[in-house]
Image (cartoon, grey):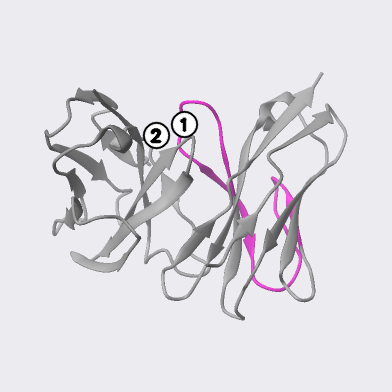
Amino acid sequence: KAGVTQTPRYLIKTRGQQVTLSCSPISGHRSVSWYQQTPGQGLQFLFEYFSETQRNKGNFPGRFSGRQFSNSRSEMNVSTLELGDSALYLCASSPIGTAGANVLTFGAGSRLTVL
Amino acid sequence: DAKTTQPNSMESNEEEPVHLPCNHSTISGTDYIHWYRQLPSQGPEYVIHGLTSNVNNRMASLAIAEDRKSSTLILHRATLRDAAVYYCIKMGSNYKLTFGKGTLLTVNP
């Protein structure tokens, strides 16, 4: 079965712009979670959506937002980009969420460079 | 803040066992311990997870200390394909995840 698909894989933006990243989960998975990965901070949890509702959010400013559609596909948006937003953005899907015993399947990520 | 600590790097020889440690400063009775690994230019890949008891699967074994504040991922016979960054993750029932910084495993032929 198809894995988690993230688009675009690579993108370059300039400071002050905004960006939208897309994630298509594994068919049947209802939870999508997003992560930021940087060399300095490592992997950090952004937020998790289940059935179009955000259930949990990490410690990121309000410039980072997301949403989930009725088909479980998800998007995340970063507004007013800063240089420090340059990172690999990963999304993961799971049948029911990021809690406890649930196994996450990650996409390959979207690499954002902010100039 | 709760912290998950892993060594920055470890090295092993091919065909030898590897023990990758992870420590949690705090862990509750409902927090699961997960291990994922990441190859260059790929997203993390699931390896194993457990709650209290030691766990085995086709990829690895997971040994969890009695107080659950430490765990060890065991690769019984390392291969060159096991070279990756290994992440220990505490996954709570409230959807809160705490990541370690990851251990870069180098496997020598």
Residue A48 position within the rendered picture, expressed as x and y whole percent measured from the top left: 31, 61
Q: Residues within 10 Å of mark 2 (few under 14, many from 20)?
A: many
Report which quarter residue A111 is drawn in.
top left
Left or right: A111 in relation to B101: left
Q: Please give the name of the residue rendered at 45% of the width and 69% of the height, measured from the top-left corner.
A: A99
Residue A73 position within the rendered picture, expressed as x and y whole percent measured from the top left: 20, 50
Report which quarter residue A36 is drawn in.
top left
Please tell me which residue lies in front, A109 or B21: B21
Q: Residues within 10 Å of mark 1 (few under 14, many from 20)?
A: few
**Label 2 amino acid?**
Ala
Q: Which chain does the residue under circle 2 lie in?
A: A
Rendered-image quadrant of the N terminus of chain A:
top left
Q: Which chain does the residue under circle 1 lie in?
A: B
Please tell me which residue lies in front, B57 or B108: B108
Q: Please give the name of the residue rendered at 31% of the width and 58% of the height, measured from the top-left corner.
A: A47
Tag shown at residue A108: 2
Dots 2 and 1 on the same chain: no
Is B42 covered by the magenta stretch?
yes
Left or right: A96 in relation to B39: left
Q: Please give the range of residues in magenta.
A: B36-63
- Residue marked by disc 1: B42
Q: Please give the name of the residue rendered at 68% of the width and 49% of the height, measured from the top-left corner.
A: B6
Rendered-image quadrant of the C terminus of chain A:
top left
Left or right: B20 in relation to A15: right
CB contact under 8 Å: marks 2 and 1: yes
Q: Secondary structure at mark 1?
A: loop
**Cα gap from disc 2 to disc 1, whole angstroms:** 5 Å
